[in-house]
Image (cartoon, coloured by chain):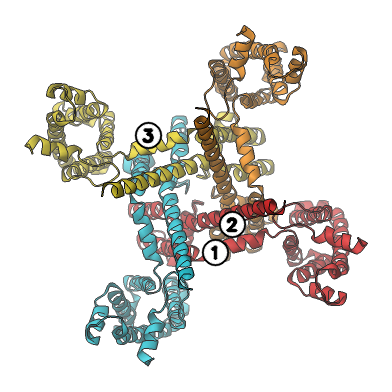
Chain colours: A red, B cyan, C yellow, D orange
Amino acid sequence: MSLRHRAWLQLNGDPPGDGHLSPGNWALAIIIIIAVVASIVSTEPDIEAQYSTLFLRMEWFFGAAFSLEYAARIWTAAEEPGTQSDLRKQLAFIFSPLGLIDLAVLIVTLLPILVPGVGVLRLTRLLRLVMLAKFGHFSSAFRDLALAIHSRRYELYVTIALAGFLLLIGATALYLAEGSVQPEKFGSIPRALWWSIITLTTVGYGDVSPITPVGKIMASIVALAGIGLVAMPTGIMAAAFSEAMQQRREELHKNDHHDS
Amino acid sequence: MSLRHRAWLQLNGDPPGDGHLSPGNWALAIIIIIAVVASIVSTEPDIEAQYSTLFLRMEWFFGAAFSLEYAARIWTAAEEPGTQSDLRKQLAFIFSPLGLIDLAVLIVTLLPILVPGVGVLRLTRLLRLVMLAKFGHFSSAFRDLALAIHSRRYELYVTIALAGFLLLIGATALYLAEGSVQPEKFGSIPRALWWSIITLTTVGYGDVSPITPVGKIMASIVALAGIGLVAMPTGIMAAAFSEAMQQRREELHKNDHHDS
Amino acid sequence: MSLRHRAWLQLNGDPPGDGHLSPGNWALAIIIIIAVVASIVSTEPDIEAQYSTLFLRMEWFFGAAFSLEYAARIWTAAEEPGTQSDLRKQLAFIFSPLGLIDLAVLIVTLLPILVPGVGVLRLTRLLRLVMLAKFGHFSSAFRDLALAIHSRRYELYVTIALAGFLLLIGATALYLAEGSVQPEKFGSIPRALWWSIITLTTVGYGDVSPITPVGKIMASIVALAGIGLVAMPTGIMAAAFSEAMQQRREELHKNDHHDS
Amino acid sequence: MSLRHRAWLQLNGDPPGDGHLSPGNWALAIIIIIAVVASIVSTEPDIEAQYSTLFLRMEWFFGAAFSLEYAARIWTAAEEPGTQSDLRKQLAFIFSPLGLIDLAVLIVTLLPILVPGVGVLRLTRLLRLVMLAKFGHFSSAFRDLALAIHSRRYELYVTIALAGFLLLIGATALYLAEGSVQPEKFGSIPRALWWSIITLTTVGYGDVSPITPVGKIMASIVALAGIGLVAMPTGIMAAAFSEAMQQRREELHKNDHHDS
């Protein structure tokens, strides 16, 4: 096997549904996670001030690592199955969604090194979180999730519509009951919507809550009726995803038996 | 095909379970959503003051759109399958629940245009939220949900009764434990019920919470025992709905195979 | 059919799983609900002061209604299937759990009427909530729920034990992290347990929450790991109950087909 | 049957999946629970001061009980099935995970008795919570749970990764929206993560919450989208565990029929 083919296997070789990553992908996943954590931590002013040299060095390291990875992905793209010329396959990778993400991450990582001063800008730093999208290289799982959601889209529409109606009805009820007593908090339906979202998701910060008996009775009815409705879309999504995974496992199992 | 029949298909032609809306229904759905959003946003005094001319124009537009729709629905009602005369079918539509809702929405939308000064009244504005009921034209999904709930009504009765008992027992326990310490919050069972509803739905605003050790122990027991009970009715409803949709999909699938 | 047998059917005749109540039981259920609501509302001092005469009259009414019901149940107990003498069956009812509950409710209802002054005592009033147990007459559903829970007791033990461990580990972690900073709130494991119960049930009043970075990190880990665990026992219970109901419906359905 | 074999059955004889404990194990379980409760309660300064003599006596008792148990376990380890010599089996127990836990618990229990003054140290007391690990003797249930989780590890990875992404996106959104308005609470992504964890687990203490309209809109979107995602891993775990238990029950049932 050629070196290029072995490099290609390292970068792309995770059989779907298996969940095992190649050593090359493991290394890359760890580098991305460290880069993300560094980006997050560096937004904390105290830590940034104290460890600015460390963060700068890490930026050089991530810049080098992602440059190397990008070059390797272009080089090995020629190993993709297909009858086109090597150059065509390489161009196909460069302009594929994952290829463009890799390029975007590279630019965002290299920019603060090449253009001093830009790295201090809040936005540049946040753009680095784009690198989370690089995880798209590793797994077919997100596609599975998207398919599972798609297969239940009808239930999802209905339950999301119902949740929306309930949020609106709850906000309107409290706007009528408490609008004149707490105008800052319930003085319009958009303001009351903040209450109804925070209540029906059961977060309940306590920054807005009814104080009149009528408001409390209405809030109680809305809370008891709605608690479940707002949670229904997720329940349906979780069930669909779990089921889709179950089916695939059974199919893999059948194929295994068939092969042997 | 006559123009009237094509108009009827545009207004009523969504095959059940498919989820696709006709272009005519898409346009209508979008107009309703915009009208609802405008109604909501216009309750915010700052925005109302600044954009009152825009809101007035939108009201004219919605009035015109809903008048047109209502006329079209009466006109095309003659295309409904059946052997009655056209007039009978049209009267049947006018006095059907959806026909009456359309009329109510039309009145509520036109009133503030025709009777100046009425539009300022809070109640008139809120009545416009009735237009949400117009969504009943689009989908058989709410009927599915109602059927799914009906098929599990026995479980729902029992779990709702249990949740009610628990809310009451929790309120009574805290009334005994904290009634004399925080009379404003736990001084009677109805007052303590506000606590038990906000706690057992896990909203937990924090406006009422026990402060004595005995109250905290009782609240802990109630919270641990009850958290699930209050969520059980929704869980059962979600499962019933998801299952009913699953069955219908399978039936549609069978019919598809049978037809071909 | 004798009058006694018809009265017995009115009081006991709900075929299990059907959910329909006889007219006699409907009337009784409504009386119990009104009596419970009256008991609850009368704990509110303002209302009690204003409507004390009404509450007194209602107590007379409930006393009469429950006396009549108790007498009727003893009288009709002779209609129970079996070969014992009428008196034996009647004694069997008097000393059965439901019979003793009826007697207890009767005493608690009549006491404040017969012994003036006792009705003012808080405890006497609360004892009246015992009348909720009278609902045991109406339905086999609570027995179904108990059976469903029993069939999954093994899962319930394990998940309750896990939830208990997690509550304890969370309390210990926060006791170590915040014990010296907020001694009033986290100064001992029992105190920290109040935090961990209110957090892991996701109630989150906000009366106790970590303020140090270490405490916040630990609380985050505990919250993310534990949120589900504490909800697991309910999920299992809901699934078991829903399944048991489903099975019974299928059995009833089979029997219906078998009979015809 | 020899005395040693009967003692071994008492200490180890719970057939998997049955859930019944031998009388010997019941006694031990109760002692461990009392010892854990005593450890917890003794961290409360007021109670410790008042009942220090009682706690000291209890420590002597637990020390004696656990010494006896440890000796009995080593002695009866020779009854384990296998062809090795008695001594080998006993050494195998001493160096097994459960054997080492028993030794650790023994040391932690005896230390404050043997070395006066050590018992006052906070850490020594907490180490006693290690005794919870002794429950590992009793049940195969935790192994079942671990297996159930393992069988769904792929779904768990995906949903945990998604939950992580959402927590991060939520924190970043609020950092951008409220970072300059509430720098203490949203001034960096790590600080904003505390908000996003407490919000998306629906705990909602209320110590941090958005105050600007933009922040509230973003928080609403994050809350509505994310509430379910963060709960998905648990839902999957609960389903897997419940299913695994169901399967085992069915297998036990089959074996029972096969045996008879």
Q: Which residue is mark 1?
A: A151
Contact flag, marks 3 and 1 (Cβ < 8 Å) = no
Q: Is residue C64 left or right of residue C120?
A: left
Q: Give the image location of residue B208, x and y in percent.
A: 43, 43
**A171, above or below B160, in the image:** below
Kindly identify which residue carries mark 3: B173
Mark 3 is surrounded, within 10 Å at the Cα level, by few (under 14), some (14 to 19) or many (20 or more) other residues, namely many
Earlier in the chain: of badge 2 and badge 1, it is 1
Going by the numbered disc 2, the residue's amino acid type is: Ala
Q: Amino acid at mark 3?
A: Ala
For the residue carrying disc 1, how many other residues have a C-alpha within 10 Å: few (<14), some (14-19), or many (20+)? Answer: some
- Label 2, on which residue? A244
Residue A106 percent coordinates (x, y): 82, 67
Residue contact between numbered discs 2 and 1, judged by CB atoms under 8 Å? yes
- Give the image location of residue C244, x and y in percent: 40, 42
Q: Are marks 2 and 1 on the same chain?
A: yes
Is the same chain shared between marks 2 and 3? Answer: no
Q: Which mark is residue B182?
A: none
Q: Are marks 3 and 1 on the same chain?
A: no
How many numbered badges does the structure rendering display?
Answer: 3
The residue lying toward the viewer, choosing from D238 and A5, is A5
SS label for mark 1: helix
CA distance for labels 3 and 1:
46 Å
Q: Residue at x 27, y 27 (%)?
A: C97
